[in-house]
Amino acid sequence: MAGSNSIAELDRRIAIVRANLTQLMEQAAAQSGAADEALASDRIAQQTEELERLKKERDALAAKID
């Protein structure tokens, strides 16, 4: 059962990161200026990397349970 809780926690974190990405993309579309664009791009890249890491972690955990 501990695995299920871990998967649920990873799913929750994945949902948060996805929501963050959506918000960052909306903010990036509304911003102008090179500095703002660079910051937004960096933050989007960071969140994308976090999302991929969490998805891999979740998939690995799910494979152990199955």
Image (cartoon, rainbow, N blue to C red):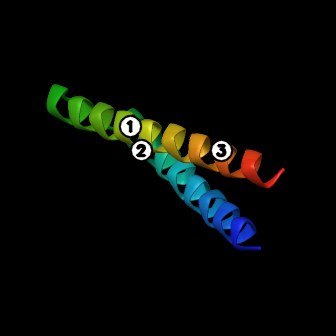
Provide the secondary structure element on which disc 2 rests. Answer: helix
Q: Cα distance, mark 1 to mark 2?
A: 6 Å
Provide the secondary structure element on which disc 3 rests. Answer: helix
Q: Given contact means CB atoms under 8 Å apart, are the residues at marks 2 and 3 in contact?
A: no
Q: Is residue 32 visible?
A: no
* Residue at (68% x, 43% y) in the render: 59
The type of residue carrying mark 2 is Leu
Q: Position of residue 11 (x, y in %)?
A: 66, 58
Q: Please determine whether, in this image, residue 60 is positioned above or below residue 16.
A: above
Q: Cα distance, mark 1 to mark 3?
A: 24 Å
Decide if residue 65 is on the left or right side of residue 52.
Answer: right
Q: Nearer the viewer, residue 22 or 16?
A: 16
* For marks 1 and 2 on the same chain, the one whose residue lies earlier in the sequence: 2
Question: For mark 1, what is the residue?
Answer: 44
Question: For mark 2, what is the residue?
Answer: 24
Q: Given contact means CB atoms under 8 Å apart, are the residues at marks 1 and 2 in contact?
A: yes
Q: Residue furthest front?
A: 64
Provide the secondary structure element on which disc 1 rests. Answer: helix
Q: Position of residue 49 (x, y in %)?
A: 43, 37
Mark 3 crowdedness (10 Å alpha carbons): few <14, some 14-19, many ≥20: few
Q: Position of residue 10 (x, y in %)?
A: 61, 59
Question: For mark 3, what is the residue?
Answer: 60
Decide if residue 51 is on the left or right side of residue 49.
Answer: right
Q: Nearer the viewer, residue 57 or 39?
A: 57
* For marks 2 and 3 on the same chain, the one whose residue lies earlier in the sequence: 2
> Mark 1 or mark 2: which is in front?
1
The type of residue carrying mark 1 is Ile
Q: Nearer the viewer, residue 4 or 15?
A: 4
